[in-house]
């Protein structure tokens, strides 16, 4: 009597070689913590010590402002891997395979341009003019001091890192100099690394697909409800 052979499990797809790298604005998060602390403190104080319509107005105000503060401070993030760029903005999540990215622009704001022509701002990568001026001064001092390779060098992917997100979302401030590249502001260095990754991965088979956009109803819903309740309370006041 033979024992039945167990069927071998179906082959599983290989795990991605590189995990998502996440970029957030530490300044925005710190500001969000401070704003939420103030809103909750004032709101609960008004709810428990106020009289008449004040507690209801405070409750409606918190329902409106807490989601908005969360959306603009804690929510923005940029997720990067070899196959696609995922941008989480205050009210939308945009997923762009590298084949659908036409370019990345840095001006007074950082944005990604899709092949279709649509533009999406990277809220998690704010532009700091002060950081740009500081990086320019450091670059000038390095060139004046005659440091070798102070200009005309590659970014984080210039040392065999193209094709993987490696150190992409780590502390990019001063990373250009550490990796043999020009000194750039942190946000500009990050955008430069995204450009190099897009150029390296645009034609990869796993980086094909369509752009998807999803609205953040979990943020817009509560905020809209708070606005409606607040408007009603003020109207009947």
Image: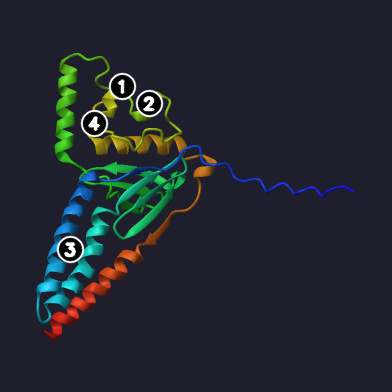
- Distance, label 1 to label 2, CA atoms, is 8 Å
Q: At numbered mark 1, what does the secondary structure look like: helix, strand or loop? A: loop
Q: Position of residue 189 (x, y in %)?
A: 28, 34
For residue 158, the mark is 2
Mark 2 crowdedness (10 Å alpha carbons): few <14, some 14-19, many ≥20: some
- Distance, label 1 to label 3, CA atoms, is 47 Å
For residue 180, the mark is 1
Residue in the picture at 19% in, 24% down: 139
Q: Which one is earlier in the sequence, the residue at label 1 or at label 3?
A: 3
Q: Which one is earlier in the sequence, the residue at label 1 or at label 2?
A: 2
Q: At numbered mark 3, what does the secondary structure look like: helix, strand or loop? A: helix
Q: Nearer the viewer, mark 4 or mark 3?
A: 3
**Closer-to-camera residue (69/44):** 44
Q: Which residue is mark 4?
A: 184
Q: Which residue is mark 3?
A: 40
Q: Say whether residue 190 is left or right of residue 35.
A: right
Q: At numbered mark 2, what does the secondary structure look like: helix, strand or loop? A: helix
**Closer-to-camera residue (49/129):** 49
């Amino acid at each position: 009597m033979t024992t039945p052979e167990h069927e071998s499990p179906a082959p599983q797809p290989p795990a991605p070689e590189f995990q998502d790298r996440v970029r957030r604005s530490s300044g925005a998060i710190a500001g969000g913590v401070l704003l939420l602390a103030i809103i909750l403190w004032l709101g609960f104080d008004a709810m428990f010590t106020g009289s008449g319509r004040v507690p209801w107005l405070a409750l409606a105000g918190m329902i409106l402002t807490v989601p908005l503060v969360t959306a603009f401070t804690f929510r923005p993030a940029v997720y990067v891997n070899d196959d696609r760029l995922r941008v989480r903005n205050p009210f939308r999540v945009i997923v762009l395979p590298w084949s659908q990215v036409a370019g990345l622009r840095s001006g007074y704001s950082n944005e990604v341009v899709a092949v279709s022509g649509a533009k999406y701002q990277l809220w998690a990568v704010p532009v700091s003019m002060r950081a740009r001026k500081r990086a320019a001064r450091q670059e000038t001092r390095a060139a004046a001091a005659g440091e070798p390779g102070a200009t005309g060098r590659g970014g984080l992917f210039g040392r065999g890192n193209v094709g993987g997100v490696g150190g992409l979302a780590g502390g990019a401030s001063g990373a250009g100099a550490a990796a043999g590249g020009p000194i750039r502001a942190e946000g500009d260095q990050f955008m430069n690394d995204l450009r190099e990754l897009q150029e390296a991965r645009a034609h990869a088979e796993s980086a094909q697909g369509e752009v998807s956009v999803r609205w953040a109803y979990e943020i817009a819903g509560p905020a809209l409800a708070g606005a409606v309740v607040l408007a009603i309370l003020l109207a009947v006041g």
